[in-house]
Image (tube, rainbow, N blue to C red):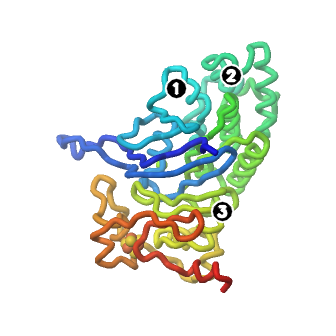
Amino acid sequence: DTPVLELVDLVAGYRSRQGPLGRSRAVRAVAGVNLAVRAGETVCLVGESGCGKSTVARAVVSLLRPIAGEVRFDGRDVTALDRAGRRDLRRQVQLVFQDPYASLNPKMTVHDLLSEAWRIHPGIVPRGDWDAEVAALLERVGLNPGHATRYPHQFSGGQRQRISIARALAVRPRLIVCDEPVSALDVSIQAQILNLLARLQRELGVAYLFITHDLGVVRHFADRVAVMHLGTIVESGQTEQVYERPAHPYTQALLSAAPSVDDWRAQEGEEIVLRGDVPSPLDPPSGCRFHTRCWKARDLCRAEEPALVRRDTDHPVACHFATDAHVVAADGH
Ligand code: SF4
Ligand code: MG
């Protein structure tokens, strides 16, 4: 079946000016990414800040035009859509941000925030049903339906994120891109929001592309995980594969540093501390883009970029010297 979302060799970025008089240069923050999200599935894109995750998000919701490659929705290249197709895409793909307060207009009531899109996309909810539909949405996300006349500042951070989620659901999307949706929240509230998202997926079949820097957060939430480093995906697979048998040194380092993830670390021991700074996407290292920080780097790594190679079922890894530990484990040892 055709994935809801498919990124095909996606290259995307922005222009950056170096110094006040510097010439502007194109930064390829996303340097050739392939990724698919199927209906009703949760795919997590994980990486450090600056790795290009948010640029992926912006390209997916058409805030950014790809430099090369394609963003496909239901198998169609979104840059080739006509006016009606683009409008439909804007409804079917919704974005939930890290900071709900910045994305919710403080001068609008919850009722106005949730019904705003019904003005833009007529035909979803008839005007006479708006009050009832707003109440139903609030109830669905665990908020008091009687609070529709309140303003965003009258809610807590977690409640505001529930409002953002309700607003995304109001137009009945097939895919919600969640860009660090729980990073600004307390740990106990994070779990509540993740549980809410999981329940909504079971009830509505909506798919998520969930973007986070925190592997610990998505351990029990993601169906599949893609690890992104400096504009490329270095490893992806079923959540179990990536957490229990991480094969790329960068994934291993991220996992060893995530305090709430211990299945792999319990086997392997020590936290891996990466040396040096994250290189700039303006001037990525030659060969393997991770070689300046990788403890396993050899000459080949500086000379040649490793391809994403499938190691076991649907578990591609981009490393010349990926560990084979999990292959042994798959044999029953
Ligand atoms: Fe490290 Fe080399 Fe593998 Fe890159 S290709 S992750 S530098 S071992
Ligand atoms: Mg970001």
- Residue at the disc numbered 3: 219
- Residue at the disc numbered 1: 86
Question: Which amino acid lies under the numbered mark 1 shown in the image of this protein?
Answer: Arg
Q: Which residue is drawn at 63% across and 69% down?
A: 261
Looking at the image, residue 82 lies above or below residue 159: above
Q: Which residue is drawn at 80% across and 27% down?
A: 135
Question: Which amino acid lies under the numbered mark 3 shown in the image of this protein?
Answer: Arg
In this view, the residue in front, 77 or 180, is 77
Residue farthest to the left, as pictured: 21
Inter-mark Cα distance, 3 to 1: 34 Å
On the image, the x and y values in percent for residue 222 come to 65, 56
On the image, the x and y values in percent for residue 228 come to 47, 58
Inter-mark Cα distance, 1 to 2: 20 Å
Inter-mark Cα distance, 2 to 3: 34 Å
**Label 1 vs 2, first from the N-terminus:** 1
Quarter holding the C terminus is bottom right
- Residue at the disc numbered 2: 115
Residue labelled 2 has its Cβ within 8 Å of some atom of ligand 2: no
Q: Nearer the viewer, mark 2 or mark 3?
A: 3
Q: Residues within 10 Å of mark 1 (few under 14, many from 20)?
A: some
Q: Which of marks 3 and 1 is in front?
A: 1
